[in-house]
Image: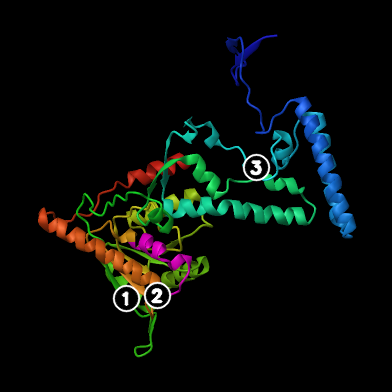
Amino acid sequence: SDINVIDNVTKNILEHLNDIVIFPPKHFVSTKPQIESAIKSIQAELKERLEYFNANKLYLEAERLERRTRYDMEMLRSIGYCHGIENYSRHLTGKLSGEAPDSLLAYLPWKDGKPDFLTIIDESHISVPQIRGMYAGDRSRKETLIKYGWRLPSALDNRPLRFPEFKERVGRVVFTTATPGEFEKENSKQIAEQVIRPTGLVDPEIEIRPVFDKTKNYSQINDIMAEITVLAQKGERVIVNTLTKKQAEDLDSFLRSKGLKSNYLHSDIKTFERTEILKDFRLGKFDVLIGVNLLREGLDLPEVTLVAILDADREGFLRSETSLMQTMGRAARNVSGKIILYADRETDSMKKAMAEVARRRVKQVAYNKKYHITPKTIIKKIEDLLEISTENK
């Protein structure tokens, strides 16, 4: 028989091949003897689990597990795989219970029993907690499935690496972040700070205003509306950070009802729409962008001169020192950048964030004075966003 490359439309033969590599549709591909061995192991575990359910009068769970597992075993015998085959990975690979799973890190070079490569973790203040939490999150979900008879207990071995296992496999690491967490600080032998910006821009000044001023009967919403009105007349942009998606949507509707041009951005909005919203924001189609936690890392919006953080004194992960620092950084792209924290009290997170900004400002101002540098707003082409938008289409 021949192996040919054929034009999809004309069906003409484009090329004759002597051999071809066809990759499997599933990660777990085994030989027939391995599959038979896995099925025997699965049967033994199924028997043990059914005895447990029946002994505890959990007949529905027992029936559910037996039906599903026997169907999966029949699929394995017939076609070599089944839906959710990864949940039987321990049986297919012959690993012991609790043994670390294989990952792409196993393909990277090792020397003298140690990883021989450099790992760079970008935005480590987000990435490290995510890596640390993956195992627990996965286990919690799987334990529920196992409890109610949807999966065998061996499904727990189809899991992410534990954090210590991850650390053993990456060796030397460079963390890159504007706001390092405690882990990065405690585990770094050398910290290289990039406090000085090439543009000479300094971290923006911070002002604290009350959430509600009883003497004036004046709320944070009244105040930010006044700020937006003034800045919009100058052609400048404002970012308002809220605590919830509902609050962002409600504030957007309220500002629109008052004749202000606004929009909101949060996780329910698809990636392409987010790009369009950011593009319109930079083009000046609206003056204020309201968001929750998407207005933090990786957004360069040089037209923004004010970042307002509502309810800044509500302690939590959205108002932690790191979150506050990241959000406030959106105003550090414009020479006129300013921060307003709406709070009736100063939380520990606020104090730490403000102290860090003050520390950086001292260095930045001193450097600019020493080398006669005049701060300049960064220049970023809006076409950059347009290109991203086109790619997403």
**Residue bearing mark 3:** 99
**Residue bearing mark 2:** 347
Is 241 left or right of 43, judged from the image as shown? left
In this rendering, the answer to whether 294 lies above or below 154 is below
Point out the image quarter for the N terminus. top right
Q: Nearer the viewer, mark 1 or mark 2?
A: 2
Is 130 left or right of 138, judged from the image as shown? left
- Pick whichever of labels 3 and 2 is earlier in the sequence: 3
In this rendering, the answer to whether 117 lies above or below 389 is above
Mark 1 surroundings within 10 Å by alpha-carbon count, few (fewer than 14), some (14 through 19), many (20 or more): some
- Residue 181 figure quarter: bottom left
The amino acid sitting under disc 3 is Glu
The label number, if any, that marks residue 208 in the structure image: 1
What is the CA distance from the residue labelled 3 to the residue labelled 2? 43 Å
Q: Which residue is painted at 47% across and 52% down in the image?
A: 128
The percent position of residue 314, horizontal first and vertical second, equals 45, 74
